[in-house]
Amino acid sequence: MNPDKFYIKPEEVEEFTTVYQILDHARRKYPTKAAYRQMETRTEESSITFGQFAENVESLRAALWQRGCRGSHIAILGETSQEWISVYMAVVSGVGVCVPIDKELPPETMVTQLNFAEIQTLFCSKGCLKKLQKILPECETLETLVVMRGSGDETAEGVENVLFLPDLLEEGRELLRRKGERALPQTIDPDETCLIIYTSGTTGANKGVMLSNRNVMGTLRGCARLLHYPDVSFSVLPVNHSYELHAHIMSCMYCGTTVCINNDLKYLVKNLERFQPEMSCMVPMMLDLLVRKMKKQIADSGKQEQFDRMVKLTKALNKVNIDVRRRVFADVLKPLGGKLRMIICGGAALSQETVDFLSSVGVQIYNGYGITECAPVAAVNPLDRARKFSVGHLLPTMEARIADPDEDGNGEIQLKGANVMKGYFKAPEDTLKVFTKDGWFRTGDIGHIDKHNFLYISGRLKNLIILPNGKNVSPEEIEDSLRKHIPYIKECVVYADEQNTDIHALCYLDPEYRAANGLDAEEAAKAHMTPDFERFNSQMPGYKKIADFEIVDREFEKSTTHKIQRFKIAAIKN
Amino acid sequence: MFDKIVDIMLEYNNVPREAITPETRFLADLHMNSLDIMDMVGQMEEEFDVVIATEDLNDIFTVQDLVNYLNDLV
């Protein structure tokens, strides 16, 4: 089969090499359509059209360019907002190097990242300024602070210039009126570094990934050929993460999709009802919450039996291509706003039960495979043709190969193509380590590719346990099997002892299951799980058997992208 | 106040009503995850018509802490 059959017809985007071309495309194609909707107070929202948004970006480009920010490093720190996105667009469009900072980080880490990236200008939201205020004088290279979404009376100790975004926009507008095009950068080099994104640090210290416009466009062009973005989408993940920024927000700009911005996780459900999106990108924890709410609503309405009957009926009808799920379950879909039909989900393991429930009521979950070093998407499941257990079809902008495959075809996934980063900022040795001599990027992930270019991941090379008999064991693969075999395990981490002779597991059990089955005491929980654990072991080959398990009382510590920080657990246990 | 708070909390926990006391801890006893807590806070805001600052949550560990905090706000 020709893999090209999975690609949507190539469009204009094929020719684009800079993010600015996406903005220009949106301004011409959808000038009066809402680009962003966001909450200004608890009850009031604002919106901006693609035309107005592009005008703001041009004004900012002019103001920054004329203030001499050429090639300088400019950081953005704040909640997702159209202002945040406009600063990003302006900086990467020929002005300088944009460095997004995670607002969830402790202030000390923020300062470390700002200093490492040699930041001269910081765009900071009012909320984040409060958090950073005390240690701002420690930002060695910082000269200018621009307050976004502030009230206009903010001050910042130890910073030479404090500006406000609306003033900077006005300054840019004036420059454009006087000088026209001459106020703007004349060229945008698609291969120059325009972005430094810090990795989330699931395996250790954060590294600054240097990306160019061509790298970012690799993701945007690839996603445009595998996915179709609907009319209205909903942004809930942090904008500083490459996945949300590029695979969601920027791709929506190309498709003319209105992005509605969630202002706070407190209002997730309320905002879903307000904005009624058709699509969103989420992490499993969010889906679990939404599913629980939907199930509760069914139970409270006293229609559980009717619901179960209708699921069976709609499933049968679906088999003969009659899909009435969304009509039949219109009431059930209300907590999701009523129109949500497509969720791209990643970041952690998602339970099959959640996927099945959402699918039964007409909401499809799609996954993909991304890594910050690839701007970040390398593969994504095409709409309507997703393959179970695969993380998606390779993007047309990427090539992949499997290094040293084992008997099952699994080996390290190595990538080449438009998306692959230029290197790590100020870390040439780390950069050398992740590229092979013939120029392939070593992802550190283990998996295989099928003949139709669908990618399957079985684990992380860095986490690989090499047993004394030479057998390689991927802890993620065992964790995945263990969770499937014992569904009441909510999270687990498999690790080897110091001598690498035995494999052990730490399990965090579903607290509701524990409460419902009288397993609050650790001994009771352990006794309950032991027979299931033994059955699991009996089905595993010798070298994949788990010697012992422990029950932990709370969820594992995670990074800001909700990934378990495995290296911390391994350090404690050994 | 306490009863209303417990009503909302029960939506997130499969525990009997009498198991929730003023000393009950959200994380250690009820094992609520961060998103559940945020969603619950959103519901509390609506119920009591207040705004709960996210950073204030760092000092709220037990049901009684929340009762005291909301009493101060209302």
Image (cartoon, coloured by chain):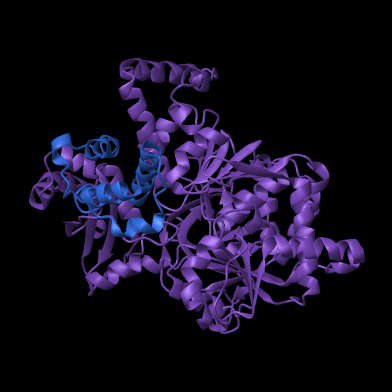
Chain colours: A purple, B blue
Residue depicted at 77% across the width and 49% down the height: A52
The quarter of the rendered structure image containing the C terminus of chain A is bottom left
Q: Is residue A443 above or below residue A280?
A: below
Residue depicted at 34% across the width and 69% down the height: A567
Q: Which quadrant of the view contains residue B7?
A: top left
Confirm whether residue B1 shows in the render: yes
Confirm whether residue A563 shows in the render: no
Q: Position of residue A123 (x, y in %)?
A: 62, 67
Along the line of sight, the residue nearer the viewer: A449 or A528: A528
Q: Is residue A271 above or below residue A396?
A: above
The quarter of the rendered structure image containing the N terminus of chain A is top right
Q: Position of residue A158 (x, y in %)?
A: 56, 81
Along the line of sight, the residue nearer the viewer: A202 or B12: B12
Q: Is residue A43 above or below residue A196?
A: above
Q: Which quadrant of the view contains residue A48?
A: top right
Q: Position of residue B31 (x, y in %)?
A: 24, 49
Residue depicted at 60% across the width and 83% down the height: A141
Q: Is residue A449 above or below residue A302?
A: below
- State left or right for residue A7 relative to residue A537: right
Tag count in the figure? Answer: 0
Q: Position of residue B45 (x, y in %)?
A: 39, 42
Q: Which quadrant of the view contains residue A11?
A: top right
Along the line of sight, the residue nearer the viewer: A317 or A351: A351
Residue depicted at 44% across the width and 21% down the height: A315
- State left or right for residue A232 relative to residue A50: left
